[in-house]
Image (cartoon, helix red, strand yellow):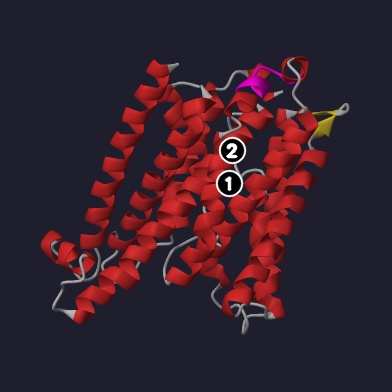
Amino acid sequence: MKKITGKTGYIMLALFVLWLLCAMVSLTMGAAQVTVKEVVSALMGQSSDSSLSTIIMDVRLPRIVGATVVGMALATSGTSMQALFRNPMADPFILGTSSGAALGIAVGMVLGIYSGMLGFGLISIMGFIFAIAATMLVMSLGRISGRMSNTGILLSGIVVSSFLLSIISLLYVFNHDKIASIYLWTMGGFNGVSWDKIQLITLPIIIGVIFLSLKAREFNAITLGEDYAAGIGMNVEGFKKTTMIVTAMLVAFSVFVSGIIGFVGIIVPHLMRMIFGVDHKRMILLSAMGGGIFLLVCDTLSRVILQSGEIPVGIVTSLFGAPFFLLILRRTKPENML
């Protein structure tokens, strides 16, 4: 056990160093080219160029922190859902949780509660409630012969997600003056992320990630089957509901800041599982760190690919994720899809 713990610690340290390198590179890249020395001066509060300091401290750094925290939330949610449903393709985006949260937040925009810190709180609660409702609907529709079928859940998630996104599109059509930016928002992005929003989401997301990581034993058990988990004394239904609530919270706060970003919860857990194994005692925390790095890299690419603008980060993750999803689909054994 000590050997595993020590090895996990070294891996986490290596991932943290990798994140630091990616963050430093991201701070130097963009429309305004900045040197590493200028970045360090700005971070230490010693920059003589106020405009450059503003770009680094109030524009790029919030994006880096936001992308990292949201990536941690989405990757952790994906890892948890894949274990809970014993489905290698389970993901907040695929299962409709992200779309549910997005619809709740879009409704909040239409109702005009998007204002001040209190507005932030209310709109996040709406996203949370809609995310829970969407996930429960998918689980209900995915039942075949009284039990949750992996195939049924996957197909139900795709249908529910598409339906909810169509409702968001209708809200956009009929309330264009109130939510003119919702089209780009549904494709995901961190443009305009502020420190106020980051302060709102960071603590709940960190608490959620830590909570799920402390349930590693239960995740390991449930991946062996619900009968086995119940046999060792687990309250399986209670664990499912708790996991759904926590993952919905993570997704709701993420969508509030970044919009809908897909495939992070599929790509990162699979990469971590392929490299470091299936034990959730290390998988959840490593996936969280890997998710932060992955989304940070994708957001940096979204800023620098075009000279005159940026690409929504959701498009970048989809360009990586769609082929990865198909690869998983081809490699998944038929019995694991049922």
Residue 221 inside the magenta-drawn segment: yes
Q: CA distance from mark 2 to mark 1?
A: 6 Å
Q: Which residue is mark 1?
A: 208
Q: Position of residue 98 (x, y in %)?
A: 62, 53
In the displayed structure, does residue 1 sit left or right of residue 246? left
Point 15% across, 67% down: residue: 41
Q: Nearer the viewer, residue 137 or 45?
A: 45
Res. 260 in view: no
Residue sitting farthest toward the front:
2
Q: Position of residue 223 (x, y in %)?
A: 64, 22
Dot 2 amino acid type = Leu
Find out whether the residues at labels 2 and 1 contact each other: C-beta distance under 8 Å. yes
Few, some or many C-alpha atoms within 10 Å of disc 1 (few <14, some 14-19, many ≥20)?
Answer: many
In the displayed structure, does residue 294 sit left or right of residue 14? right
Point 58% across, 28% down: residue: 216
Point 53% across, 27% down: residue: 280
Q: Nearer the viewer, residue 274 or 69?
A: 69
Looking at the rendered structure, the secondary structure element under dot 2 is: helix
Q: Which residue is mark 2?
A: 212
The stretch in magenta equals 220-226
Q: Is residue 267 above or below residue 337?
A: below
Few, some or many C-alpha atoms within 10 Å of disc 2 (few <14, some 14-19, many ≥20)?
Answer: many
Q: Is residue 173 above or below residue 210?
A: below
Q: Which mark is residue 194?
A: none
Dot 1 amino acid type = Gly
Position of the C terminus by quadrant: top right
Residue sitting farthest toward the right:
146
